[in-house]
Image (spheres, helix red, strand yellow):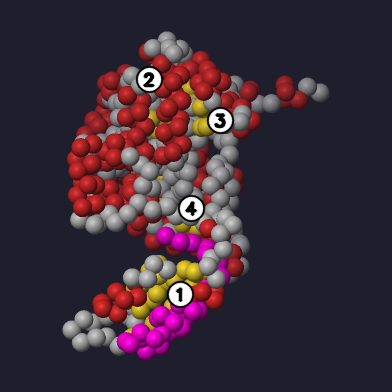
Amino acid sequence: MKVEELLSPKVKSIPPSGIRKFFDIVTEMKDAISLGVGEPDFVTPWHIREAGIYSLEKGQTYYTSNWGLIELRKEISNYLNRRFDLSYSYTNEIIVTVGGSEAIDLAMRAVISPGDEVLIPEPSFVCYKPCAILAGGVPVPIVTKAENQFKLTAEALKEKITPKTKLLVLPYPNNPTGAIMDKNDLQAIADVIKDTNILVLSDEIYAELTYEVKHVSFASLPGMKERTILVNGFSKAYAMTGWRLGYAAAHPAIIGAMFKVHQYGIMCSPTTSQYAAIEALKQGDEDIEYMAREYNYRRRIIVDGFRKMGLDCFEPLGAFYVFPSIQKTGLTSEEFCEKLLYEEKVAVVPGTAFGESGQGFVRCSYAYSIENINEALKRIEKFVKKYI
Amino acid sequence: MEEILRILEENNKITPEQIAIMLNRDVDEVKAAIRKMEEEHIILRYKTLINWEKTEREFVTALIEVKVTPQRGEGFDKVAERIYKYPQVKSVYLMSGGFDLTVIIEGKTMKEVALFVAEKLAPMESVLSTSTHFVLKKYKDEGVIFEEKEKDERQVITL
């Protein structure tokens, strides 16, 4: 029996992610430092961790409702209203998921029919394309460009819309570019799709991490709530990555469909995490502000550092990534990352891990201490000087 | 101003140049602001937080609750001054509640601290009573946890 041949061709067709490659090396290499990790360096605030501990002490170790705890859904509803001016009913418009990632998967599986086209602005987070394929859809990348601050433009969107277009992914604030879409940018997108049946998957997991400007949710635009599947979670805003907790908010029919997939595939999200998340939403606004301020300091340091060494670096206003252009070095993204790792022992991620259009760029995370960032910048500068 | 202070309070090794970048301000403006705050004694001193317990140095710290009679016209300030002028006194706070002054003192031995209380502090005219508590272990000081591990525990993951 040749087991490999028994695997699903669809799964086999999905290439492995390009992000991991370098990091296995980093962990082995002495003195190597990394700007590679895409998760907060903060530990979850203690009062939130403690809420998780209390729930365990009280013996709250059972499944919750498939939807998630009702108190948590109420708090999510309040939170979305308080911070983004959105109005979602906790009874049938919100579902608690295992991270934002599960919500993305559920959304795709709930709405995509075989052959449906899924528009994905690139460079972007690595999961949209495989999730679309696994759901039977056809991913259609839309290239975003540095000269447009990596925003999705109405023109680029129009070009890719066909009668088969079912879903548009809006991944802003964006991983890996740090791009955001302000209200006008979003309105331009809304104007393009308002007379179509295209649904929007708005992945707003970095909504709390915008700098200089406040995040605007696509769902808050007039007429857009009905067609928008809003995805958010606790990982980035509250530094709760390991708790695996997110949620989706959408029209009751869509949430109902996602619910079906969720209840059979997952049953419910981790109970301890849900109790901790209630505390986060009730008492965590100050934590969000503290962490966002710290990220902003680092963001300015790292952007300044790349510009001073002569690389073009557009100013990212969201998430915790910078996406400098390394074209001046004459190296491809992969060459740059590999040489940088072996010559100066700094790990960054090639832009191509996030789509072909990431060629010529690298992703650097600034979810690191200022000391770490300064040291990394020093080494990268030394490296870059050899090539430009 | 407040943001500069917050950054320096956390880490005074950060240079004015770096602060200027972090706050998106002009370097000269930041330097001038720091100088002004130094002159106005808003910034008093740049100190280093040390975990002495990891060194060979022998010393004890005590927290002393002091009840005093405030002096006419001077309030508590005069008596506080007489106490804080001793170099072995590290901190003096005026308190609300059951006693008046918290005095934190450091000495080489418990005996040295006890003698200070018996010979200097307690006999002061306006001191009514003292209650000395020795510190056995410091877990956290100035917002810093002493035994915190600094290792990056984030693992390799696809995202």
Q: Which residue type does callout 3 highlight?
A: Ala
The Cα atoms of the two marked residues, 1 and 4, are separated by 33 Å
User: Can you identify the residue that label 1 sits on?
Assistant: B63
User: Can you identify the residue that label 2 sits on?
Assistant: A325
Label 4 secondary element: loop
Between label 1 and label 2, give the one nearer the viewer: 1
The Cα atoms of the two marked residues, 2 and 4, are separated by 33 Å
Residue in the foreground of this view, choosing between A322 and A146: A322
Residue in the foreground of this view, choosing between B35 and A183: B35
Query: Can marks 3 and 2 be said to lie on one chain?
Result: yes
Q: Which residue type does callout 4 highlight?
A: Thr
Residue B31 x/y as whole percent: 23, 41
Q: Chain of mark 2?
A: A
The Cα atoms of the two marked residues, 3 and 2, are separated by 22 Å
Q: Which mark is residue A44?
A: 4
User: Can you identify the residue that label 3 sits on?
Assistant: A32
Q: Which residue type does callout 1 highlight?
A: Leu
In this picture, residue A125 sits left or right of residue A16: left
